[in-house]
Amino acid sequence: MGKRLNLILLAIILFLAAWLRLFWLGGSSLWSDEGNTWALIGRGFGQIARDAAADIHPPGYYWALKVWTSFFGATVIGMRSFSAAAGVILVWIIYALGRWLDQRKGLQATALLAAFMAALNPFQIYYSQEARMYMLLTLESAGLFLALFALRERQRATPEQDRGRDWLNWPAAGFVLWGIAGLWTHYSFPVILAAAGAAYLIDWARDGRDTPGGRPAAFMYFVILNAIVLVAYLPWLPTAMDRVLAWPKGGESIPFLEGAMLTFQTLLFGPLTSLPEPLWPWLVWAVALPLAGMAALRRERTMPGLAAWLLAPIGLMFGLGLFSDAFLKFLLVASPAWVLLSAGAGRVARPNWPWQTLLALGALAVAAVSLPSYYGNPTVRDNYAGVARYVAATGDPARDIVLLDAPGQQEVWSYYAPPVPVLPLPAQRPPDRAATEAALADALAPGARVFALFWAEDEADPERMVETWLDTHAFKGLDTWQGDMRLVIYDVPGELQCTPLDPAPIFGQRMKLAELCLPAAGETGAGVTPGEAGLVGLRWQALEPMDRRYKISLQLLDDRGLVVAQQDTEPAGGARPTVDWTPGETIADNHGLPIPPGTPPGAYRLIAAVYDAETGERLPVGEGDAAELGTMTIVNPPTSPPADLLNLAHRVDAPLGPVMFLGYDQHKLGYAHAPETPVEPGDAVTFTLYWQAPDPLPPDWPDDLTFTLELGGNSTTLPLAGGGFPTGEWTPGQLVRTVVRLPYDGGDRRARLIVGEDAVRFKALPR
């Protein structure tokens, strides 16, 4: 009965692991490294090896994936399914490893618990859904230790039990095959081989020479197995040594305590950025579990091996100073050991079942607080897919360009391949300023739009040559982070028509706004489409030398005085700080005021303010603190951008009445740049709500739907788009954005949004 129950529970756990790894497998975009994977597997096996030789990875993963995709297709799902399969097999191997921690007959509780914790582990789930080699590397590490433990058990067998067995047995063959595969997968695998060697030495010395497992012949047998692994890697060894020695460090050393916290945060949650608050109880849990497991399993022969397996990758991180986002994934190979030791903590006291139940509930809690923010979040990886859809829908192939600043972007962009031409700049490393600026000047014609995808700028363009040139010569509009990639849209103006302002607004008796410049074809009242930028040129003159750096805030206000669009920069995109101004000199300061997607159509007030970059204090102008520049008209877009381009602080994606409520932002009034600023009673709170109409619109679609927003004892009821754009005018699938302000009276800190009979509660305001 015990064996059958083990198999039933294991099958359920493996099904859960498979479901969590296959769910939403193609939901997030390929990012740059996955684009490189896609490009490589499209080449021949020999070319893959030659191209990998120029990179920092061996070719083994790409060879295996090429074979896999010949059956399952070189699509997002086809490529990632290889890692998903490796992740499910890893859960089974963790169960097999756990059986050494639970030798009694009957229910293998520790092994099942370890498999359950692995099935739910966000770190393992994340990399089981990525077309890179790290989940395969982790599987190979686990397979190596499974073979190692089985080999030691075999070597300890009595001569009578061992009689008649072949010299080459399955544990030995497994150790060799997993070792060879790991070396051909990643250059960090020698650390795992070293950990396995240390574990073997400890166990071998523990046996003593009077036992079969402790005899010199047993040790020599292990040495021969490692020699076979090394010989199989010799063809690639010179390339590996050359690449590792030439590899730029790229990481950063941090204090031990900070590094330890980051290590266990990663082992618990992986690279996910939406973490529970406060975080410290979870970190205590992540550290205490393996320590308790080591104490509970101290008499188990496999415990030193698990400890070495856990500590070796962590030691690599500290030894080489690899604590940066790019290298934290190296901790993945330690994840199975962390899971096994954590599951062993369930045996810290007897009876075991209450502790094991607590650990299982803890694993469920970790998954519950982290995985919902992972599934469905388009920016959990760099969102090239969403940007490509937006470029395809709004870009003009005859006029516009896509600018890529890092070599690794070209492959992933080729996968999605919108029809707009691509300009990769800088063209070389280190960048050549003259050549880069000449290429930009030649490529950008008046009226063009530039979709700039900035990624890895510290390496690709450390002096920001491209961005500085664009800030100076074009109008900067939408600027949005899509994962670790930043999309910035620039408009290249044609001839500007500048009109002197009479009287010229004077700010703090220090500077005046002499002229307002608009594109020749329009004026401030010309129509601008949401998602694009309103082009506004300001011409400043200093009235006296200035020793302070001031920022210019260009704002668009609705009829309730609420800010619906804003851009705050130093003059000329930072290229002409006010401390460098000379009295009498005219400073050209061009702004592309980004109109957020979903902004309702209508006429909006345009104002300009100047404030101290350090203190935030505005300079007075006239009787107020801002100058009126006229109006700007927003027109209805022909098509809405993809919803995944919205940078929502809180994504909901829930139906409210007949509309989809996508999510919201909330912050203390005036603190959009610092949304975690505490809100106190008496403060005003700004909420930005994002809606999407159904596609197609239902026959009973309302003419003017309203919502109610409650905060503490205060509430307001408004049309969904604020009053000027009734729902009857919405188009199918249209995105609409609404800004609301409510005072906070000290009551319930969680706002409540109501549409018809449906309601949703917001997260608590920051304290």
Image (tube, grey):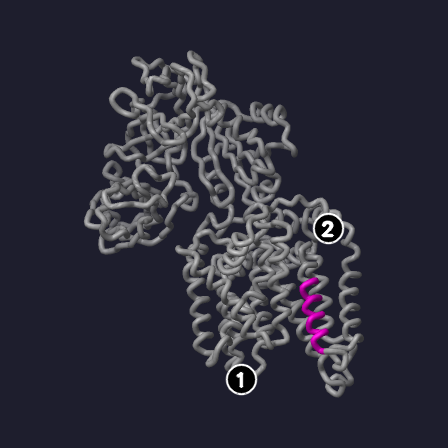
Relative to 447, is 765 on the left or the right?
left
**Residue plotted at (58% across, 70% down):** 94
Say which residue appears at 45% left-offset and 36% top-offset: 479
The residue type indicated by label 2 comes to Ala
What's the residue at 71%, 64% (across, down)?
A: 179
Q: Is residue 667 magenta?
A: no
Q: Main secondary structure of the magenta part?
A: helix
Q: Residue furthest toward the top?
A: 584
Mark 1 vs mark 2, CA separation in Å: 48 Å
Above or below, 654 against 288 in this view is above
The magenta segment is: 194-207
- Locate residue 757, reporting x and y percent: 23, 56
Q: Is residue 365 above or below residue 391?
A: below
Position of residue 414 measured from the top left corner of the image (x, y, whole percent):
58, 42
Side of 702 relative to 643 (left or right):
left
Residue density around tag 2, few if under 14, some if 14–19, many if 20 or more, within 10 Å? many
Say above or below: 663 vs 480. Answer: below
**Of labels 1 and 2, the one closer to you:** 1
Residue 1 horizontal/vertical position (percent)? 51, 86
In the depicted view, which residue is nearer to us: 48 or 406? 406
Whole-percent x and y of residue 522?
Answer: 37, 21
Residue 106's mark? 1
In the image, residue 202 lies in the stretch drawn in magenta: yes
Q: Are marks 1 and 2 in contact (CB under 8 Å)?
A: no
> Label 1's element?
loop
Name the foreground residue: 438 vs 347: 347
Q: Which residue is mark 2?
A: 49
Amino acid type, residue under disc 1 in the picture = Gly
